[in-house]
Amino acid sequence: MEIRTAVSPRDVKHYTTERLREEFLIQNLFVEDEMKWVYSHIDRIMIGAAVPVDKELVLAAGEELRADYFLQRREMGVINIGGSGTIVVDGKSYALDYKDGMYIGMGAKDISFRSECPEHPAKFYINSAPAHTAYPTTLIKLEGEAEEGVVIIKEENRVELGCLEESNHRVINKYILPGQVESCQLVMGMTALKPGSVWNTMPCHTHDRRMEVYLYFEMPEDAFVMHYMGEPTETRHVVMRNEEAIISPSWSIHAGSGSRAYTFIWGMVGENQVFTDMDGIDNKDLR
């Protein structure tokens, strides 16, 4: 498990490109038959991935958490960006296809991950945050029919924004948030850009009440995203490739423009779960 410490905006404005990448960029998350984790001191979020190929991967707390089991004092959100797979939670199996998600509540003890086909393994992307109470473990799907333990994303939580003329036509799918899948503090979802659009989260914003992590994917090998961060008047950029994630402190903007359309998963933890609680930045005020 890699540990990342919190940082001050006064320091970040002096970072070189390499230092900026060391502090915020997360690479090589998806490694076959391994679970990889980055533990950030920023709101104590954990960013991880599990790619089971030839074996089932079992979730362990690790020495860093000083817990009897991983979710003893935590909750977890998962979105599968690979082939079909299964998550087993305390003996109950949940099948996840491409872009299916899952919320696993505090108190779940025995958790493991496996793929249905080794030639096309599942890629489970994970966000975890400290929790104070237990909410039900729930499977989340983009479409289909709801049943016990399964939630279909509600129509009001599938939001189409932007336009092609402004290069930001996109669809936001909200997986974990109040009124759909309850959690202590984790809010999680996925945004897909329409062909011809390249800008996400534009106009950009900050939200001092919570931090955010982005995972960019569905990008060919030669594509990239210029991810923008920093204070609105001290912006910086990080060049990002397919299946790379980046940590965004609450004081930082978080926006990107790509060499082509792409998809990204966003996860937020912090003071509140109000999706619209944002401090908007006028384009003319960016520097």
Image: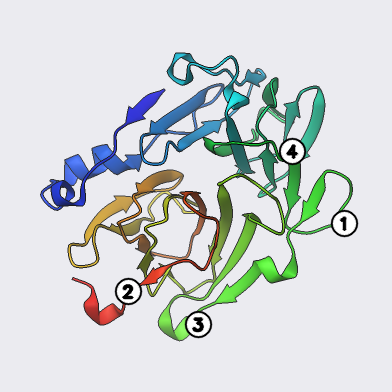
Q: Of tags 4 and 3, which is closer to the observer? A: 4
> Around disc 1, counting alpha carbons within 10 Å, would you say few (fewer than 14), some (14 to 19), or many (20 or more)?
few
Q: List x then y, in percent, for residue 144.
A: 83, 57
Q: List x then y, in percent, for residue 230.
A: 25, 57
Q: Earlier in the sequence, mark 3 or mark 2?
A: 3
**If the image is split into quadrants, where does the C terminus sit?**
bottom left
Q: Of tags 3 and 1, which is closer to the observer? A: 1
Q: Mark 4 highlights which residue?
A: 137
Disc 2 + disc 4, Cβ < 8 Å: no
Q: Mark 3 highlights which residue?
A: 163
For the residue labelled by badge 4, is the local secondary structure a helix, a strand or a loop?
A: loop
Q: Which mark is residue 145?
A: 1
Q: CA distance from mark 2 to mark 1?
A: 39 Å
For the residue labelled by badge 1, is the local secondary structure a helix, a strand or a loop?
A: loop
For the residue labelled by badge 2, is the local secondary structure a helix, a strand or a loop?
A: loop
Disc 4 residue type?
Thr
Q: CA distance from mark 3 to mark 2?
A: 19 Å
